[in-house]
Image (cartoon, coloured by chain):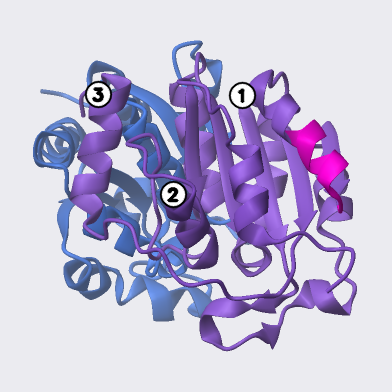
Amino acid sequence: MSGRLERRAAMAMLLEGRADDLLVVPGLGSTTYDLAAAGDNPKNFYLWGAMGGAAMIGLGLALAQPQQRVAVITGDGEMLMGLGALATIGIQKPGNLALIVFDNGVYGETGMQPSHTQSGVDLVGVARGCGIATCLDVADEAGLRDLAARLKSLCGTLFARVAIEANEPPRVLPERDGTVLKQRFRAALGVKA
Amino acid sequence: MNVQLADWPDILFATLKRAGIAQVGYVPDAGHARLIERCSADPGIRDVALTTEEEGVALAAGASLGGERAALLMQSSGLGNCVNMFSLARSCRFPLLMIITMRGEWEEFNPWQVPMGSIVDPVLKLCEAEVYRVTKPEEVESATERAVQHVFGDERIGAVILSQQLIGKKVWVK
Protein backbone atom coordinates (compact mmCIF):
# COMPACT_ATOMS: atom_id res chain seq x y z
CA MET A 1 0.00 0.00 0.00
CA SER A 2 1.50 3.32 -0.99
CA GLY A 3 1.76 6.28 1.36
CA ARG A 4 1.92 4.10 4.43
CA LEU A 5 4.83 2.82 6.47
CA GLU A 6 5.68 -0.77 7.24
CA ARG A 7 5.04 -1.31 10.96
CA ARG A 8 8.14 -3.29 11.94
CA ALA A 9 10.43 -0.87 10.12
CA ALA A 10 8.60 2.06 11.70
CA MET A 11 9.00 0.63 15.22
CA ALA A 12 12.68 -0.11 14.60
CA MET A 13 13.28 3.43 13.36
CA LEU A 14 11.53 5.00 16.35
CA LEU A 15 13.65 2.98 18.77
CA GLU A 16 16.97 3.18 16.93
CA GLY A 17 19.69 4.15 19.41
CA ARG A 18 17.14 3.89 22.21
CA ALA A 19 18.16 5.93 25.23
CA ASP A 20 18.31 4.32 28.65
CA ASP A 21 15.63 6.60 30.02
CA LEU A 22 12.95 5.66 27.49
CA LEU A 23 10.10 3.57 28.90
CA VAL A 24 7.79 2.01 26.34
CA VAL A 25 4.20 0.84 26.77
CA PRO A 26 2.69 -0.75 23.66
CA GLY A 27 -0.97 -1.68 23.20
CA LEU A 28 -2.20 -5.24 23.17
CA GLY A 29 -1.83 -7.09 19.88
CA SER A 30 0.28 -5.90 16.98
CA THR A 31 2.18 -3.07 18.68
CA THR A 32 3.23 -5.45 21.46
CA TYR A 33 4.58 -7.85 18.79
CA ASP A 34 6.25 -4.95 16.95
CA LEU A 35 7.97 -3.81 20.12
CA ALA A 36 9.16 -7.33 20.91
CA ALA A 37 10.45 -7.67 17.35
CA ALA A 38 12.47 -4.47 17.77
CA GLY A 39 14.32 -6.12 20.65
CA ASP A 40 13.30 -7.12 24.14
CA ASN A 41 14.04 -4.66 26.93
CA PRO A 42 13.01 -4.73 30.60
CA LYS A 43 11.80 -1.16 30.14
CA ASN A 44 9.08 -2.43 27.78
CA PHE A 45 5.79 -3.10 29.52
CA TYR A 46 4.00 -5.35 27.04
CA LEU A 47 0.22 -5.51 27.20
CA TRP A 48 -1.76 -8.65 26.46
CA GLY A 49 -5.09 -7.16 27.47
CA ALA A 50 -6.51 -4.03 29.13
CA MET A 51 -7.66 -2.69 25.76
CA GLY A 52 -8.11 1.07 25.91
CA GLY A 53 -5.73 1.40 28.85
CA ALA A 54 -2.31 1.93 27.28
CA ALA A 55 -2.38 5.74 27.26
CA MET A 56 -3.47 5.93 30.89
CA ILE A 57 -0.81 3.45 32.00
CA GLY A 58 1.59 5.81 30.25
CA LEU A 59 0.20 8.79 32.15
CA GLY A 60 0.49 7.13 35.57
CA LEU A 61 4.04 6.09 34.74
CA ALA A 62 5.02 9.49 33.35
CA LEU A 63 3.74 11.25 36.48
CA ALA A 64 5.55 8.79 38.74
CA GLN A 65 8.83 9.06 36.80
CA PRO A 66 9.20 12.67 35.68
CA GLN A 67 12.93 12.19 34.99
CA GLN A 68 12.26 9.43 32.44
CA ARG A 69 10.50 9.66 29.11
CA VAL A 70 7.49 7.49 28.37
CA ALA A 71 6.35 6.41 24.92
CA VAL A 72 2.98 4.72 24.53
CA ILE A 73 2.98 3.09 21.11
CA THR A 74 -0.41 1.60 20.40
CA GLY A 75 -2.84 0.84 17.59
CA ASP A 76 -5.82 2.80 16.29
CA GLY A 77 -8.34 0.30 17.65
CA GLU A 78 -6.77 0.38 21.11
CA MET A 79 -6.68 4.18 21.13
CA LEU A 80 -10.30 4.39 19.96
CA MET A 81 -11.41 2.26 22.90
CA GLY A 82 -9.94 4.77 25.34
CA LEU A 83 -10.38 8.10 23.56
CA GLY A 84 -11.34 9.77 26.84
CA ALA A 85 -7.74 9.31 27.94
CA LEU A 86 -6.72 11.96 25.41
CA ALA A 87 -8.94 14.46 27.22
CA THR A 88 -7.54 13.39 30.59
CA ILE A 89 -3.95 13.64 29.36
CA GLY A 90 -4.75 16.88 27.54
CA ILE A 91 -5.44 18.60 30.84
CA GLN A 92 -2.61 16.92 32.79
CA LYS A 93 0.00 17.93 30.20
CA PRO A 94 2.87 15.73 31.39
CA GLY A 95 6.14 16.94 29.91
CA ASN A 96 7.55 13.47 29.40
CA LEU A 97 4.80 11.53 27.62
CA ALA A 98 4.49 10.68 23.93
CA LEU A 99 1.40 8.93 22.58
CA ILE A 100 2.10 7.31 19.23
CA VAL A 101 -0.67 5.56 17.34
CA PHE A 102 0.18 3.08 14.60
CA ASP A 103 -2.90 3.60 12.47
CA ASN A 104 -3.52 0.90 9.88
CA GLY A 105 -7.27 1.46 9.82
CA VAL A 106 -8.06 -2.12 10.78
CA TYR A 107 -8.35 -4.45 13.74
CA GLY A 108 -5.47 -6.76 12.83
CA GLU A 109 -5.87 -9.11 15.78
CA THR A 110 -9.45 -10.08 14.93
CA GLY A 111 -9.27 -10.43 11.16
CA MET A 112 -8.62 -7.03 9.62
CA GLN A 113 -12.08 -5.55 10.12
CA PRO A 114 -12.16 -1.80 9.42
CA SER A 115 -11.69 0.61 12.31
CA HIS A 116 -13.33 4.04 12.54
CA THR A 117 -10.18 5.74 11.26
CA GLN A 118 -10.73 4.12 7.87
CA SER A 119 -14.04 5.95 7.66
CA GLY A 120 -12.55 9.32 8.39
CA VAL A 121 -12.17 9.57 12.17
CA ASP A 122 -9.18 11.85 12.59
CA LEU A 123 -7.16 10.92 15.67
CA VAL A 124 -4.79 13.85 15.24
CA GLY A 125 -7.77 16.20 15.24
CA VAL A 126 -9.14 14.55 18.38
CA ALA A 127 -5.79 14.87 20.14
CA ARG A 128 -5.49 18.51 19.11
CA GLY A 129 -9.03 19.17 20.29
CA CYS A 130 -8.13 17.65 23.65
CA GLY A 131 -5.41 20.26 24.14
CA ILE A 132 -2.33 18.16 23.45
CA ALA A 133 0.26 20.72 22.44
CA THR A 134 2.20 18.88 19.76
CA CYS A 135 0.15 16.74 17.38
CA LEU A 136 1.80 15.17 14.36
CA ASP A 137 0.49 13.23 11.40
CA VAL A 138 3.33 11.03 10.17
CA ALA A 139 3.03 9.48 6.75
CA ASP A 140 6.57 9.07 5.46
CA GLU A 141 10.10 8.22 6.50
CA ALA A 142 11.12 11.84 6.97
CA GLY A 143 8.24 12.36 9.36
CA LEU A 144 9.19 9.22 11.23
CA ARG A 145 12.79 10.40 11.59
CA ASP A 146 11.53 13.69 12.94
CA LEU A 147 9.33 11.83 15.42
CA ALA A 148 12.25 9.61 16.51
CA ALA A 149 14.34 12.74 17.11
CA ARG A 150 11.54 14.36 19.13
CA LEU A 151 11.30 11.20 21.28
CA LYS A 152 14.91 11.71 22.27
CA SER A 153 14.35 15.27 23.47
CA LEU A 154 10.76 15.19 24.61
CA CYS A 155 9.48 18.37 26.18
CA GLY A 156 5.73 18.57 26.55
CA THR A 157 3.04 16.03 25.74
CA LEU A 158 3.23 14.74 22.21
CA PHE A 159 0.69 12.88 20.09
CA ALA A 160 1.58 11.33 16.76
CA ARG A 161 -0.49 9.27 14.38
CA VAL A 162 1.69 7.14 12.14
CA ALA A 163 0.06 5.87 8.94
CA ILE A 164 0.86 2.17 8.87
CA GLU A 165 0.37 -0.40 6.15
CA ALA A 166 -2.31 -2.98 6.96
CA ASN A 167 -0.04 -6.00 6.85
CA GLU A 168 0.43 -8.80 9.34
CA PRO A 169 4.09 -9.67 9.84
CA PRO A 170 4.92 -12.91 11.66
CA ARG A 171 4.14 -12.55 15.35
CA VAL A 172 6.95 -12.09 17.80
CA LEU A 173 5.53 -13.04 21.16
CA PRO A 174 7.13 -11.62 24.31
CA GLU A 175 6.69 -12.72 27.92
CA ARG A 176 3.02 -13.05 28.87
CA ASP A 177 3.25 -13.31 32.64
CA GLY A 178 2.18 -9.89 33.87
CA THR A 179 3.87 -10.25 37.25
CA VAL A 180 7.19 -11.01 35.55
CA LEU A 181 6.81 -8.01 33.24
CA LYS A 182 5.97 -5.77 36.19
CA GLN A 183 8.82 -6.95 38.40
CA ARG A 184 11.51 -6.72 35.76
CA PHE A 185 10.29 -3.26 34.72
CA ARG A 186 10.45 -2.00 38.30
CA ALA A 187 13.85 -3.62 38.81
CA ALA A 188 15.19 -1.90 35.69
CA LEU A 189 13.91 1.41 37.02
CA GLY A 190 15.20 0.68 40.50
CA VAL A 191 11.85 1.20 42.19
CA LYS A 192 9.96 -0.90 44.69
CA ALA A 193 6.24 -1.50 45.00
CA MET B 1 -13.27 8.09 69.75
CA ASN B 2 -15.85 10.71 69.02
CA VAL B 3 -15.88 11.34 65.30
CA GLN B 4 -18.18 14.00 63.97
CA LEU B 5 -20.18 13.06 60.91
CA ALA B 6 -18.68 15.82 58.79
CA ASP B 7 -15.09 14.91 59.67
CA TRP B 8 -14.82 11.59 57.91
CA PRO B 9 -13.55 12.90 54.53
CA ASP B 10 -10.70 14.65 56.38
CA ILE B 11 -9.90 11.47 58.28
CA LEU B 12 -9.92 9.55 55.03
CA PHE B 13 -7.61 12.13 53.46
CA ALA B 14 -5.19 11.95 56.39
CA THR B 15 -5.15 8.16 56.16
CA LEU B 16 -4.36 8.26 52.44
CA LYS B 17 -1.57 10.77 53.10
CA ARG B 18 -0.07 8.55 55.79
CA ALA B 19 -0.18 5.67 53.29
CA GLY B 20 1.96 7.70 50.89
CA ILE B 21 -0.63 8.08 48.15
CA ALA B 22 0.87 10.32 45.45
CA GLN B 23 -1.68 10.06 42.63
CA VAL B 24 -5.44 10.24 42.99
CA GLY B 25 -7.71 9.53 40.02
CA TYR B 26 -11.36 10.44 40.25
CA VAL B 27 -14.55 11.14 38.40
CA PRO B 28 -16.27 14.09 40.10
CA ASP B 29 -18.72 12.85 42.73
CA ALA B 30 -20.82 14.55 45.40
CA GLY B 31 -19.94 11.98 48.06
CA HIS B 32 -16.24 12.42 47.41
CA ALA B 33 -16.38 16.21 46.95
CA ARG B 34 -14.52 17.13 50.13
CA LEU B 35 -11.89 14.44 49.71
CA ILE B 36 -11.29 15.53 46.10
CA GLU B 37 -10.89 19.14 47.28
CA ARG B 38 -8.35 18.09 49.87
CA CYS B 39 -6.38 16.05 47.31
CA SER B 40 -6.41 18.89 44.76
CA ALA B 41 -5.14 21.33 47.35
CA ASP B 42 -2.24 19.10 48.43
CA PRO B 43 1.02 19.76 46.56
CA GLY B 44 2.19 16.22 47.37
CA ILE B 45 -0.72 14.63 45.51
CA ARG B 46 -1.27 14.69 41.77
CA ASP B 47 -5.04 14.74 41.28
CA VAL B 48 -6.14 13.37 37.95
CA ALA B 49 -9.69 14.03 36.80
CA LEU B 50 -10.85 11.13 34.64
CA THR B 51 -13.50 10.88 31.95
CA THR B 52 -14.37 7.34 33.05
CA GLU B 53 -13.35 5.25 36.02
CA GLU B 54 -11.53 2.57 34.05
CA GLU B 55 -8.93 5.20 33.14
CA GLY B 56 -8.09 5.26 36.83
CA VAL B 57 -7.41 1.52 36.95
CA ALA B 58 -4.82 1.97 34.20
CA LEU B 59 -3.46 5.14 35.82
CA ALA B 60 -2.89 3.26 39.09
CA ALA B 61 -1.09 0.47 37.24
CA GLY B 62 1.22 2.97 35.55
CA ALA B 63 1.88 4.72 38.85
CA SER B 64 2.79 1.43 40.47
CA LEU B 65 5.12 0.51 37.60
CA GLY B 66 6.88 3.80 38.29
CA GLY B 67 7.06 3.23 42.06
CA GLU B 68 4.23 5.51 43.19
CA ARG B 69 1.06 4.70 45.08
CA ALA B 70 -2.29 5.72 43.64
CA ALA B 71 -5.89 5.69 44.81
CA LEU B 72 -9.03 5.71 42.71
CA LEU B 73 -12.14 7.50 43.92
CA MET B 74 -15.48 6.66 42.38
CA GLN B 75 -19.17 6.25 42.85
CA SER B 76 -20.65 2.75 42.78
CA SER B 77 -21.99 3.33 39.26
CA GLY B 78 -18.38 3.65 38.08
CA LEU B 79 -17.42 0.18 39.25
CA GLY B 80 -19.15 -1.42 36.28
CA ASN B 81 -17.05 0.71 33.93
CA CYS B 82 -13.88 -0.86 35.32
CA VAL B 83 -14.50 -4.57 35.09
CA ASN B 84 -12.40 -5.50 32.05
CA MET B 85 -9.63 -3.09 33.06
CA PHE B 86 -9.34 -4.96 36.37
CA SER B 87 -7.67 -7.70 34.30
CA LEU B 88 -4.62 -5.42 34.28
CA ALA B 89 -4.44 -5.39 38.08
CA ARG B 90 -5.29 -9.07 38.35
CA SER B 91 -2.90 -10.34 35.66
CA CYS B 92 0.05 -8.31 36.89
CA ARG B 93 -0.89 -8.07 40.56
CA PHE B 94 -0.88 -4.31 40.56
CA PRO B 95 -2.04 -2.73 43.81
CA LEU B 96 -5.40 -1.06 43.25
CA LEU B 97 -6.99 0.92 46.07
CA MET B 98 -10.53 2.07 45.35
CA ILE B 99 -12.65 4.28 47.56
CA ILE B 100 -16.25 3.84 46.45
CA THR B 101 -19.23 5.94 47.52
CA MET B 102 -22.47 4.00 47.36
CA ARG B 103 -25.63 4.87 45.52
CA GLY B 104 -28.76 2.82 45.10
CA GLU B 105 -28.77 1.04 48.44
CA TRP B 106 -30.40 3.24 51.04
CA GLU B 107 -32.83 6.16 50.78
CA GLU B 108 -32.15 6.31 47.05
CA PHE B 109 -34.44 8.63 45.11
CA ASN B 110 -33.13 7.66 41.67
CA PRO B 111 -34.10 4.08 40.76
CA TRP B 112 -31.56 4.04 37.93
CA GLN B 113 -28.82 3.88 40.55
CA VAL B 114 -30.12 0.59 41.93
CA PRO B 115 -29.07 -1.89 39.19
CA MET B 116 -25.35 -1.17 39.61
CA GLY B 117 -25.50 -0.27 43.30
CA SER B 118 -27.13 -3.59 44.14
CA ILE B 119 -24.37 -5.69 42.57
CA VAL B 120 -21.29 -3.86 43.87
CA ASP B 121 -20.37 -6.50 46.43
CA PRO B 122 -20.70 -9.56 44.15
CA VAL B 123 -18.88 -7.79 41.30
CA LEU B 124 -15.99 -6.92 43.59
CA LYS B 125 -15.91 -10.46 44.91
CA LEU B 126 -15.83 -11.90 41.37
CA CYS B 127 -12.96 -9.55 40.55
CA GLU B 128 -10.98 -10.84 43.55
CA ALA B 129 -11.19 -7.54 45.40
CA GLU B 130 -11.28 -7.37 49.17
CA VAL B 131 -14.15 -5.25 50.46
CA TYR B 132 -13.97 -2.96 53.49
CA ARG B 133 -17.43 -1.58 54.18
CA VAL B 134 -17.95 1.54 56.25
CA THR B 135 -21.30 2.59 57.66
CA LYS B 136 -20.18 4.84 60.52
CA PRO B 137 -17.70 7.75 60.58
CA GLU B 138 -15.62 6.10 63.30
CA GLU B 139 -14.97 3.11 61.02
CA VAL B 140 -13.39 5.12 58.19
CA GLU B 141 -9.84 5.18 59.48
CA SER B 142 -9.45 1.54 60.45
CA ALA B 143 -11.19 0.24 57.32
CA THR B 144 -8.97 2.39 55.09
CA GLU B 145 -5.83 1.36 56.96
CA ARG B 146 -6.73 -2.31 56.54
CA ALA B 147 -7.40 -1.77 52.83
CA VAL B 148 -4.07 0.03 52.39
CA GLN B 149 -2.22 -2.81 54.09
CA HIS B 150 -3.87 -5.43 51.89
CA VAL B 151 -3.57 -3.48 48.64
CA PHE B 152 0.01 -2.28 48.89
CA GLY B 153 1.40 -4.94 51.22
CA ASP B 154 0.20 -7.82 49.10
CA GLU B 155 -0.29 -6.06 45.73
CA ARG B 156 -3.99 -6.83 45.45
CA ILE B 157 -7.26 -5.07 44.73
CA GLY B 158 -9.14 -3.57 47.66
CA ALA B 159 -12.22 -1.40 47.89
CA VAL B 160 -13.32 0.76 50.78
CA ILE B 161 -17.08 1.02 50.43
CA LEU B 162 -18.56 4.19 51.89
CA SER B 163 -22.20 3.31 52.40
CA GLN B 164 -25.08 5.66 51.76
CA GLN B 165 -25.85 5.74 55.47
CA LEU B 166 -22.45 7.34 55.98
CA ILE B 167 -22.68 9.81 53.14
CA GLY B 168 -26.26 10.87 53.67
CA LYS B 169 -28.97 11.04 51.11
CA LYS B 170 -28.78 13.24 48.08
CA VAL B 171 -31.17 16.20 48.12
CA TRP B 172 -33.13 16.18 44.89
CA VAL B 173 -35.51 19.08 45.28
CA LYS B 174 -33.88 22.36 46.20
User: Residue B114 versus residue A123: which sits nearer the camera?
Assistant: A123
The answer to whether residue B49 of the structure is visible from this angle is: no
Tell me the quarter of the image containing the N terminus of chain A. bottom right
**Which residue is identified by label 2?**
B58
User: Secondary structure under badge 2?
Assistant: helix
**Which residue is identified by label 1?**
A96
How would you rate the neighbour count of disc 2 (Cα within 10 Å): few for under 14, some for 14-19, many for 20 or more? many
Image colour for chain B is blue
Q: Main secondary structure of the magenta part?
A: helix
Chain painted in purple in the figure: A
Q: Which mark is residue A50?
A: none
Q: Which residues are magenta?
A: A139-147
Q: Amino acid at mark 3?
A: Thr
Residue at 26%, 42% (x, y): give it. Answer: A182
Find residue B7 and report its horizontal and vertical position in percent.
Answer: 33, 26
Residue at 42%, 52% (x, y): give it. Answer: A36
How would you rate the neighbour count of disc 1 (Cα within 10 Å): few for under 14, some for 14-19, many for 20 or more? many
Residue at 24%, 17% (x, y): give it. Answer: B18
Q: Amino acid at mark 2?
A: Ala
